Amino acid sequence: MPVSFDPDHVFAALADATRRDIVLRALAGTEGVADLAAHYPMSFAAVQKHVAVLERAGLVTKERAGRRRLVRTNIEALRLARGLLDGYEAVWRGRIDRMSDLITATQEAQP
């Protein structure tokens, strides 16, 4: 399924440790919201709010299975986030390589 990727929403959602943990737990396997809530020292409603933030950011999806609301991690959204970070890393590494070349050239030019 195509993902609408908004980096601001994705990284804001991932800025919270509980939400990152929910994404990891949902990566390991589909879990119900109630099952997720059992892992945290907060109310069920608070966990529902965390899941809603992740859902709005496109990082998880919810589906109904009987009376349960199952949470799945959206792998494509994580891939898009990683791609953005990989692009930043490429720029950073390019700058380091250019600095290294400049230092080497400077050292070779010294008598």
Image (cartoon, helix red, strand yellow):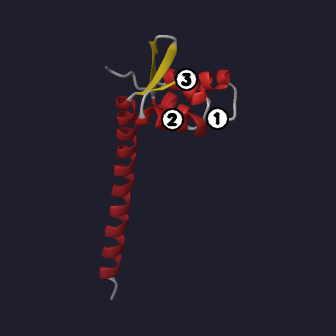
User: Vertically, is 98 above or below 40?
Assistant: below
Which residue is most to the front? 66
Q: Earlier in the sequence, mark 3 or mark 2?
A: 2
Based on the displayed image, in which of its 4 quarters is residue 80 positioned?
top left
Q: Quadrant of the N terminus?
A: top left
Q: Alpha carbon of mark 1 to alpha carbon of mark 3: how far?
A: 11 Å
Q: Alpha carbon of mark 3 to alpha carbon of mark 2: how far?
A: 22 Å
Q: Amino acid at mark 2?
A: Phe
Residue nearer the viewer, 67 or 70: 67
Q: Earlier in the sequence, mark 1 or mark 2?
A: 2
**Residue beneath the point at 31% across and 68% down:** 101
Q: Position of residue 67 (x, y in %)?
A: 52, 11
Q: Nearer the viewer, mark 1 or mark 2?
A: 1
Q: Secondary structure at mark 2?
A: helix
Q: Disc 3 designates what residue?
A: 33
Q: Disc 1 designates what residue?
A: 40
